[in-house]
Image (tube, helix red, strand yellow):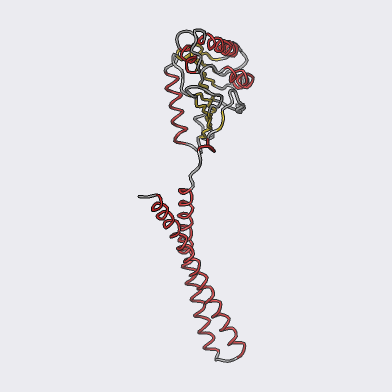
Amino acid sequence: MTHAGARRRTGTTTRRPRRTLLHTLTDRNLEAYLVSGAALVVGALNLLNVTSPEVVAAATLAVLGVITFDLLTGRRRMRRIESSLRTVVGNLRAETPDSVDRLLAVAVPGAAVGLTGARDVRLVGVTLNRTIRNHLDELRQQLAMGATVRVALIDPVGPTADEAARRNGLETSGGGEIFKNRIRPTIDLLDYLAAQNTGTGRLEVRLLRFVPAFGMMMVDPEDPTGQIVIDIYSHRPDGHEATITLRADRDPLWHRHFVREFDRIWAGGQTRHERKLT
């Protein structure tokens, strides 16, 4: 089918419900005009004594009958109007889909995401350096209030840091050391959190022997109001990483998908910390 044919077909599909809606509204207005006109005529005849009271009474009953019939059929007409409106709106949405440019945003490492009141926090990333540093106080507070915090980042020991360096264009012999030096402060901060004895929360940390394809920050993902912030990593970062936020109530399909992704990533990690803070 040609583009012109597709446009003609789409235009026909869109105009047909609009004609149906217009036809329904016109029919209803016509009946209203007829009933109103008949009532005015009967009233005028009665006032002018042009005809007998019996004729006026019969005409009045006829008008009341028409009004009653109109009330009984009004609900069916409203359903037809609602159906026509839904069809028109659906066609308009199909013709103008949402742009991905409005769904994705530029990721800001360690950007503020509210953790106040969170009971379940899950983090996935390469080094999570700025994320842990920027949210250190919030994480400590939520752990003190009994929250569970799970963190997965790459293992600084072994070839994973070298692979992360290659993905970032640091293919020289010292590229892996750069990433190892970025991971160590993160682990030091996590050790600091684990050593705190001011709450009843639980901190779990796992080290990955692979480079995750994306970063995630989950806040109460199992709750109906949970949300997930996903950073989509580039093969060769150019300073414009994409990010998207999913909500459990608004995006149930992909929200569940990434919750399962976290479980798979977590299962592939090596335990570093898994202790209850007392």
Q: Residue at x 49, y 47 (%)?
A: 96
Looking at the picture, how far across and down is residue 155, in whole percent?
Answer: 48, 12
Rendered image quadrant of residue 134: top right
Looking at the picture, how far across and down is residue 203, in whole percent?
Answer: 54, 17
Q: Residue furthest left?
A: 1
Is residue 253 rendered to the left or right of residue 52?
A: left
Between residue 134 and residue 151, name the one nearer to us.
134
Q: Residue at x 53, y 12 (%)?
A: 179
Residue 189 in sight from this viewpoint: yes
Between residue 240 and residue 42, name the one nearer to us.
240
Rendered image quadrant of residue 196: top right
Residue 226 in sight from this viewpoint: no
Between residue 109 and residue 241, name the one nearer to us.
241
Is residue 84 rendered to the left or right of residue 277?
A: left
Above-or-below relation of 196 to 28: above
Above-or-below relation of 95 to 160: below
Q: Residue at x 60, y 91 (%)?
A: 49
The total number of labels drawn is 0
Above-or-below relation of 169 to 230: above
Rendered image quadrant of residue 41: bottom right
Above-or-below relation of 174 to 48: above
Q: Residue furthest right?
A: 137
Looking at the figure, which quarter contains the C terminus?
A: top right
Q: Residue at x 43, y 30 (%)?
A: 257
Looking at the picture, how far across and down is residue 249, in whole percent?
Answer: 51, 38
Looking at the picture, how far across and down is residue 194, in whole percent?
Answer: 57, 12
